[in-house]
Amino acid sequence: MEYPDLSALPAELQDEVSSRGSLNVFRMMMHSPALAPGVLALGDAILRRSSLPDPLRELAIVRVGHAYRAAYEIHHHENIARLVGLGEEAIAAAATGSPDSLSAPEAAVLTSTDRLLARHSLDAAARKELLAFLTVNQLADLVITVGFYQLVCDFLNTFEVTTAGEAPPPYGDVQPGSDEGR
C-alpha cells in the first residue's frame, strides 16, 4: 500500500508525522486522519508516562511484535529495548517466549504477555504472580501496552509497513529513563 500524500494533509497532521521523525508507521497511519492523532497520543503516553519500568515495557512490546510476526515493530522496539537497558537474553526470550533465563519479573511479564495474547485476559493466579513484582498501576499499564501493540501490529501487517526509505529513527539518543526521542 502506498503512503498517503502528506502534503495534502492539514498542517497539524503533517506536524504529527514530522515531529516523530517521519517514520513509516506514522506516515501510513495518516490514511486515517481522524483517528491517527488519538492513536499517536496513546502511543506517546505508553512510551513516556507508563508506570511500567522501561525494560519490562519493551519486553512486552517486543514479545507482541514476535507473536504477530511484525518485523517493523520488532526492528524498532528491539533497538529501543537495548537503549533502555533490556538485556540480550531478554530480547532473545521475547522472540521465543521462553522465560527460562530471565529474572523473575521479566519471566512474569513475558508469560503474562503470552497469556494476554492467547486468552485476552489474566486470571487471578496470573495477576497474583505479576503483583509480586508490579503495582496495580503497573499491571494496568502492562495490559494497556499489550493491547495497544496488538492494534499497532495489526496495522503494520495489514498495510505491509517496512523500514524502507526511513531516515534514522529519532530514538537514537534515548537514554534509560529519558523521554527524549521516544
Image (tube, grey):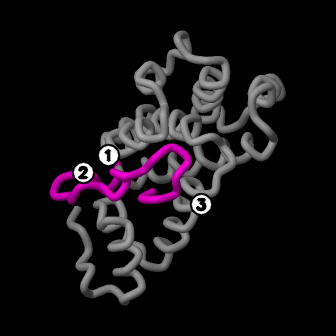
Q: CA distance from mark 2 to mark 3?
A: 24 Å
Q: Which residue is mark 3?
A: 45
Q: Is residue 175 left or right of residue 5?
A: right
Drawn side of residue 122 relative to residue 171, left or right:
right
On whether residue 162 falls in the magenta region, the answer is yes
Amino acid carrying mark 3 in the image: Ala
Check if residue 124 falls in the magenta segment: no
Comparing 169 with 1, the one in front is: 169
Judged by its main secondary structure, the magenta piece is loop
- The image position of residue 88, as x and y in percent, is 41, 23
Q: Are marks 2 and 3 in contact (CB under 8 Å)?
A: no
Q: Where residue 33 sits in the image (x, y, percent)?
A: 42, 78
The residue located at (58%, 54%) in the rendering is 46
Residue 108, visible in the rendered structure: yes
Q: Residues within 10 Å of mark 3 (few under 14, many from 20)?
A: few
Secondary element at tag 3? helix
**Residue type (three-letter) at the residue carrying disc 2:** Thr
User: Which residue position is annotated with label 1?
Assistant: 72
What residue is pinned by disc 2?
162
Task: Please report the residue visible at 40 percent of the width from the left and 81 percent of the height from the top.
Answer: 13
Tell me the quarter of the image containing the C terminus: bottom left
Q: Nearer the viewer, mark 1 or mark 3?
A: 3
Q: CA distance from mark 2 to mark 1?
A: 6 Å
Q: Looking at the image, is 163 positioned above or below residue 15?
A: above
Which residue is at the front of the view, 128 or 170? 170
Q: CA distance from mark 1 to mark 3?
A: 20 Å
Picture residue at 50% right of the left edge, 21% below the top: 97
Query: Residue 52: where, in percent of width, then height?
Result: 66, 43
Q: Could you tell me how many numbered marks the image carries?
A: 3
